[in-house]
Amino acid sequence: MKHFSVLVLVVASMLAASSSRAQFRDVGLGAGIGFGGIIGATDDLANNQTKFLARAFVRANIVNGVQAELGAGLGRMAGVNAADATRGNKDGSLSVSQLVPVDARLLLSPFSFEGWNPYLYAGVGVVHYDMENVPGNADPAVKTQGWVPYAPGGLGLQFRLDDQTMFEMSGGYNYAFNDKLNAITSTSQPNGTKKDAYWNFLVGLSVAGESGSADRDGDGLTNREEKELGTDRNVADSDGDGLSDGEEVHTTKTNPRRADSDGDGLNDREEVVQHKTDANKSDTDGDALSDGEEVARHGTDPLKSDTDNDALNDGIEVNRTTTNPTKADTDGDGLADGQEVNQYKTDPLKADTDAGSVNDGKEVAAHSNPLNPSDDVPKKPEIKVEVGKAIVLDGIVFTTGSAVIDPQSEDVLVQAFNTLDQNSDVQVEIRGYTDNVGNRKANLRLSQRRADSVKAWLAKKGIAPSRMGTKGFGPDNSIADNSTQEGRQKNRRIEFFRAK
């Protein structure tokens, strides 16, 4: 009893000290067999002999670190009667019992190491004894065979040979709850122990299938989960996409049996790690281009629907306008592709949409129509005249006393022509004036002829005569002081009066 109590205390302390780090190998149903010996542990016998023991068992995992075991064995316990041994009569007092122990045990692995595994065991059971050689001082009240309850406890080591096979070594103490195993009792042997016991040691092999909760390939999925999913429990990354099956199921929610879950041309790891795209959505940014197309073919950003910020999304540029989705102004005309398509209706592939010699951007800046080639030639300098108002055509000079236009007047006359030519709806009255020197009637006639000369010049250039009227006012409506030469020069003038 003393030996058993010590062993129970050791086992209990190790059970209490074990922590969540303790991991018994996660296995399914298994079995094993061991061979070794028995040595009696009782004062009833002297010279306890080592006899053969064989034991077979089946095991099942309960939780990580704990297994249940059912086993049965066959062995012998032998020794010389202690009282006779002191008298030297060893042969005549030999006690031999055949033992058949049957028990249930719990195995605990307090620690886990690579390739090997220590464990403790304790249990309860019954042992059948059958006296093959009864000693001379056997208690006549004890039957030569029967069943005795007992409790085994001990230590063991497992060494991994492969995924299913372990080499095992174990040893323990087996405490019987009565004194009948060798037929010598405290009644027949006053100095003997009151309870029988024996030591045993075994070496052997155990095999076990994997538990459904095991993770053979270390990918974060149990064997049971892998079977349900159809993944390979021997390969951590069944589809070879660079993500373990467990990552795909628990983290990225992708298909662990398909390298490219969304079929966009990028494998799941490329999407998750490299491009940060959605591995379950073929078009992450919703621009009508798959993520794979954007990365491999177009060089666009699969996370940004409008890569070049031109107000056209990448899909429209590739499939509809055929513009460059990575260049905001495909034709280089100074207008973004989106402006051309949505605002100005110009061709984003053609810098000068109307082929009028000025590119679209310059036309927009100049407020001309980029769809009308006729306005591409810049307007010539003209004279701005408001309806109902007159403006002096400063710089028109005539030969003294005549209506002949001096050549130096050309620049001003050209501007007058431009005004009428570029504004076809304008109608004017050309007004002639003189200073107050000389006869009034003569000045009226001279001013009329000069107005007519200007009209004739413009008509000759192509302005319709019907758009121009003339009138001579002589010295009337002076705008300066006729008493000075400078004032008289200003009063000798031609005016445009815009009638329409």
Image: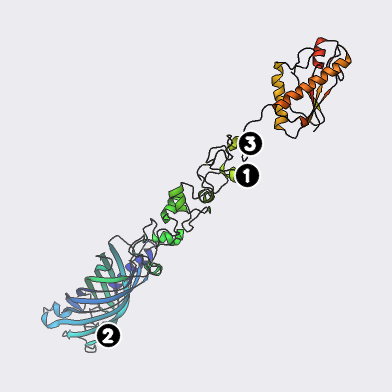
x, y percentage for residue 65? 35, 67
Q: Earlier in the sequence, mark 3 or mark 2?
A: 2
Q: Is residue 202 above or below residue 301?
A: below
From mark 3 to mark 2, how far is it between C-alphas? 121 Å
Give left or right: position of 355 versus 8.
right
Classify the position of the C terminus by image quarter: top right
- At 37% across and 70% down in the image, what residue appears? 212
The residue lying toward the viewer, choosing from 403 and 339, is: 403
Can you tell which mark lies on residue 374? 3
Residue placed under numbered mark 2 in the picture:
147
Mark 3 belongs to which amino acid? Ser
- At 46% across and 57% down in the image, what residue appears? 279
Instruction: Tell which residue pokes out farthest to the right in this image.
Output: 440
Can you tell which mark lies on residue 343? 1
| Mark 3 vs mark 2: in front | 3
x, y percentage for residue 213? 38, 68
- At 76% across and 25% down in the image, what residue appears? 455
Number of callouts:
3
The residue lying toward the viewer, choosing from 135 and 270, is: 270
Q: Earlier in the sequence, mark 1 or mark 2?
A: 2
Q: Residues within 10 Å of mark 2 (few under 14, many from 20)?
A: some
| Mark 1 vs mark 2: in front | 1
